[in-house]
Image: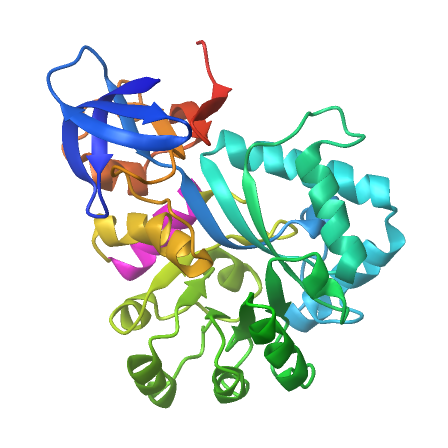
């Protein structure tokens, strides 16, 4: 299999006219030569922080505070999840997975509520069980919570925040299991950041209220951070200091709760780029290779030996035609309507014929 067009090669997304050759789900080589194609080929997105369980309650809770919306155990989200049956949750998540695929996401890192049952519901949605959508090719890296046994079925543990519980034991268990540990920190205020960092997590999520002392600790430790600026704005907690964080550590982008924001990495990139005014290449890295690095995956950049998770855009769409800087155009203006196809595991999973 091969794809032709302008290829955004490597972690710096250097535009190269030619083709990407794929075999057995892996990028074999990039061939540079003149081709008759306007398509733009880039890595599929890695959405580094999601909560897709609340797909059952999109746009619920207008006017509520962050705690009233999502704080465990009795925030609106948690009450609605408890009231929904297994089939309802699976069907809603399956729709979200289908949307994420269609908007170029190949991998997502999910903080899944509900313990073992919650993880199982997501696995059922990925498998297409009982919803009529078929198995999804998108890959989920699933971080469980709420149950001491969840590490037996999850890829890691996703803690709600250091103020919610004592996570020392589960952190030790996660490390012993050789799995990843992530934790929300600094979303509402700065009070839980040091306690979260003391757990030596594999990554932190949000860090909206990171202060000088926390930035210094990031300098020392290099703990990666996932930022979700659209979600933070919607929940009225502020916006993360993306530029300051990126100067000190690896930063990835996530879309957070489906309840409050669509899981579109196009929208997240555009907002983050215009909020931080960072170079487009840095923002695109946050949406691809940085999230893959946090999850320990071999994808996010187009280079030989990497997984063939690719996004193909129509460079001659009304939206993208005439772009002088392709990477900037991808980050700041591309969207769902520009998607030509998505390739996950070396196979097309979304393809438009129009």
* Quarter holding residue 353: top left
Quadrant containing the N terminus in the rendered view: top left
Q: Which residues are magenta?
A: 266-277
Colour treatment of the image: rainbow
Q: Does residue 131 belong to the magenta stretch?
A: no
Query: Can residue 184 be seen in the rendering of this structure?
Result: yes
Task: Judge whether 259 appears above or below 353 on screen.
Answer: below
Q: Where residue 69 sits in the image (x, y, percent)? A: 70, 64
Q: Considering only vertical position in the picture, is 183 above or below 228?
A: below
Name the residue furthest left: 33
The one of 340 and 299 positioned closer to us in this rendering? 299
Q: Where is residue 108 drawn, in percent x and y?
A: 52, 48
Q: Looking at the image, how many numbered discs can be counted on the residues?
A: 0
Left or right of residue 99: residue 223: left
Q: Quadrant of residue 318?
A: top left
Query: What secondary structure do most residues of the magenta stretch adopt?
Result: helix
**Residue 317 appearing in the image:** no
Residue 240 in the image: state x and y as whole percent.
Answer: 41, 69
Horizontal relation, residue 138 to residue 52: left or right:
left
Q: Residue at x 36, y 25 (%)?
A: 23
Residue 4 relative to residue 205: left or right? left
Can you say which quadrant of the picture contains the C terminus? top left
Task: Check the image and report above or below for 33 versus 265.
Answer: above
> What residue is drawn where x is 49% and y is 83%?
193
């Amino acid at each position: 299999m091969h794809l032709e067009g302008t290829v955004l090669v490597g972690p710096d997304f250097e535009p190269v006219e030619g083709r990407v050759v794929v075999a057995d789900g892996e990028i074999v080589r990039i061939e540079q030569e003149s081709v008759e194609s306007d398509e733009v080929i880039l890595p599929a997105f890695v959405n580094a922080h999601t909560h897709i369980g609340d797909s059952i309650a999109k746009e619920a809770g207008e006017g509520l505070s962050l705690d009233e919306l999502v704080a465990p155990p009795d925030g609106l989200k948690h009450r609605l999840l408890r009231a929904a049956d297994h089939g309802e949750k699976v069907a809603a998540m399956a729709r979200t997975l289908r949307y994420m695929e269609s908007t170029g996401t190949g991998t997502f890192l999910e903080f899944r509520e509900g313990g073992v049952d919650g993880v199982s519901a997501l696995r059922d949605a990925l498998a297409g069980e009982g919803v009529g959508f078929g198995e999804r090719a998108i890959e989920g890296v699933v971080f469980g919570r709420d149950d001491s046994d969840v590490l037996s079925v999850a890829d890691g543990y996703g803690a709600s925040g250091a103020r919610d519980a004592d996570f020392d034991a589960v952190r030790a268990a996660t490390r012993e299991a050789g799995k990843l540990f992530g934790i929300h920190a600094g979303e509402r205020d700065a009070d839980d950041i040091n306690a979260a960092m003391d757990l030596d997590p594999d990554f932190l999520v949000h860090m909206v209220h990171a202060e000088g002392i926390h930035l210094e600790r990031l300098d020392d430790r290099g703990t990666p951070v996932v930022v979700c600026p659209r979600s933070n704005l919607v929940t009225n907690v502020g916006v993360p200091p993306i530029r300051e964080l990126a100067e000190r550590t690896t930063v990835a982008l996530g879309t957070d709760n489906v309840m409050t924001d669509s899981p579109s990495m196009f929208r997240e990139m555009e907002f983050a780029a215009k909020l931080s005014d960072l170079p487009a290449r840095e923002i695109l890295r946050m949406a691809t290779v940085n999230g893959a690095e946090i999850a320990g995956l071999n994808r996010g950049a187009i280079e030989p030996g990497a997984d063939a998770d690719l996004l193909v855009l129509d460079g001659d769409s009304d939206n993208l035609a005439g772009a002088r800087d392709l990477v900037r155009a991808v980050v700041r203006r591309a969207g769902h309507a520009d998607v030509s196809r998505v390739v996950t595991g070396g196979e097309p999973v979304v393809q438009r014929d129009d």
